[in-house]
Image (spheres, grey):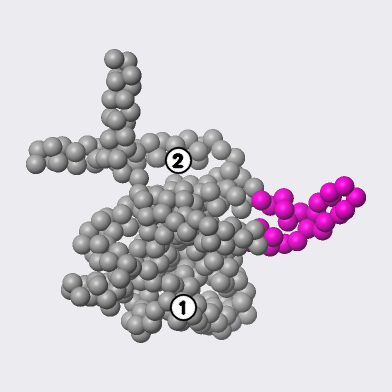
């Protein structure tokens, strides 16, 4: 009992130490790195928040959802409208006046970010209750349809969203501190959730719904729980993306962004938060590094014109290869754990001592 308590205390200390190290590295990066590198790291951290949400729904619960872009849009517009100065709203809504209830509304960024997540979570509950009775491809098509409905509504609700023109001049609050901080909090909350009885129920549903139900797991309750939590993280991630780019536009929330987040989750490993973090930053770096394949190239006497979107074609091929030949992704369902790390270190030390003898 004491050994278990000591081990748990050591884990907490190591986790706390890791958070301090992440904070120090973030501070160093924010003060030292150039804007381009900061941009790449910030995007990677925002991807972590977004991918954690989708992994909860698809990776841990096994519910194939393609509605992530819709929840992101709700979060992005909510936070933008709550934080944008009155004068900037007037400049945006110059064709059709903004709704009177939103005209003079302005609150600080942190509560706006939380409200954005809660609005997306509320919509997740409203949508999840009817559609989570579906399974597999049918659920995917239903959530994709929901995402398109949200985009069409945004295009037509001009007094609230400014229609297809979107919102420009959204306050650029998001720096590396906000992006990394949100990523750390998202991973922490998701890890706490999946390691409780709720998380074990989600995994049981993923493995076999009939078996899970036969031992008393409420399928509907736990599916809705995962869907609402995933929508919350998607809303927060969408809000971060809007404030990072200083603009919110319906074209930002098409099926393409859902596919990007799905790619990260699949490559990292369905049901692995560690894999999600690794894949998010790797994806952000690779997307920048592969820009050269969209530029005009000359191979010998052959000139190849630049083709916009070739990076997504390449990532589509990567996902196809992962699904066909390496279905577990980078981490499978494995997670980094201090216990395993310390045991491996002790085993290495013992082996080294044995060789010395």
Please state the horizontal and vertical placement of residue 217, each as a whole percent of the image.
21, 72
Q: Residue 58 carries which label?
A: none
| Residue that label 1 marks | 137
Position of 315 compared to 107: left or right?
right
Position of 314 compared to 134: left or right?
right
Say which of 227 and 338 sits in front. 338
- Quarter of the image with the C terminus in it: top left
Position of 257 compared to 181: left or right?
right
Name the residue located 46 percent from the left edge and 78 percent from the top edge.
137
**Res. 254 visible in picture:** yes
Q: Are marks 2 and 1 in contact (CB under 8 Å)?
A: no
The vertical placement of 29 against 291, above or below, is above
Q: Which residue lies furthest to the left in this view?
A: 1
Q: What stretch is highlighted in magenta?
A: 290-312
- Quarter of the image with the N terminus in it: top left
Please state the horizontal and vertical placement of residue 333, each as a whole percent of the image.
37, 55
Say which of 242 and 190 sits in front. 190
Name the residue located 24 percent from the left edge and 41 percent from the top edge.
12
Q: Which mark is residue 26?
A: 2
């Amino acid at each position: 009992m004491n050994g278990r308590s000591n081990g748990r205390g050591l884990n907490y200390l190591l986790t706390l130490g890791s958070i301090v190290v992440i904070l120090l590295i973030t501070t160093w990066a924010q003060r030292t790195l150039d804007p381009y590198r900061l941009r790449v790291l910030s995007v990677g951290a925002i991807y972590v928040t977004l991918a954690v949400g989708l992994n909860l729904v698809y990776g841990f619960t096994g519910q194939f959802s393609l509605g992530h872009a819709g929840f992101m849009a709700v979060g992005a517009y909510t936070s933008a409208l709550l934080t944008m100065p009155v004068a900037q709203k007037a400049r945006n809504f110059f064709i059709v006046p903004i709704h009177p209830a939103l005209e003079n509304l302005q609150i600080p960024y942190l509560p706006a970010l939380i409200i954005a997540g809660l609005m997306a979570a509320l919509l997740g509950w409203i949508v999840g209750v009817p559609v989570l009775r579906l399974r597999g491809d049918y659920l995917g098509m239903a959530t994709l349809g929901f995402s398109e409905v949200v985009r069409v509504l945004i295009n037509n609700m001009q007094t609230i969203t400014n229609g297809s023109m979107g919102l420009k001049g959204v306050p650029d609050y998001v720096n590396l501190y906000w992006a990394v901080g949100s990523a750390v909090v998202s991973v922490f909350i998701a890890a706490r959730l999946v390691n409780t009885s709720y998380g074990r129920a989600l995994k049981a549903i993923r493995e076999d719904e009939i078996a899970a139900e036969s031992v008393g797991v409420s399928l509907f309750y736990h599916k809705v729980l995962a869907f609402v939590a995933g929508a919350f993280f998607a809303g927060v991630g969408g809000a971060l993306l809007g404030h990072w780019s200083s603009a919110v536009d319906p074209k930002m929330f098409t099926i393409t962004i859902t596919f990007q987040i799905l790619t990260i989750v699949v490559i990292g490993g369905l049901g692995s938060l560690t894999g999600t973090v690794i894949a998010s930053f790797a994806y952000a770096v690779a997307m920048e590094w592969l820009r050269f394949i969209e530029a005009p190239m000359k191979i010998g006497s052959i000139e190849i014109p630049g083709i916009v979107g070739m990076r997504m074609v390449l990532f589509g091929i990567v996902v196809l290869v992962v699904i066909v030949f390496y279905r577990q992704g980078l981490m499978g369902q494995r997670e980094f754990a201090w216990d395993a790390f310390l045991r491996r270190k002790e085993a290495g030390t013992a082996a080294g001592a044995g060789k010395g003898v």
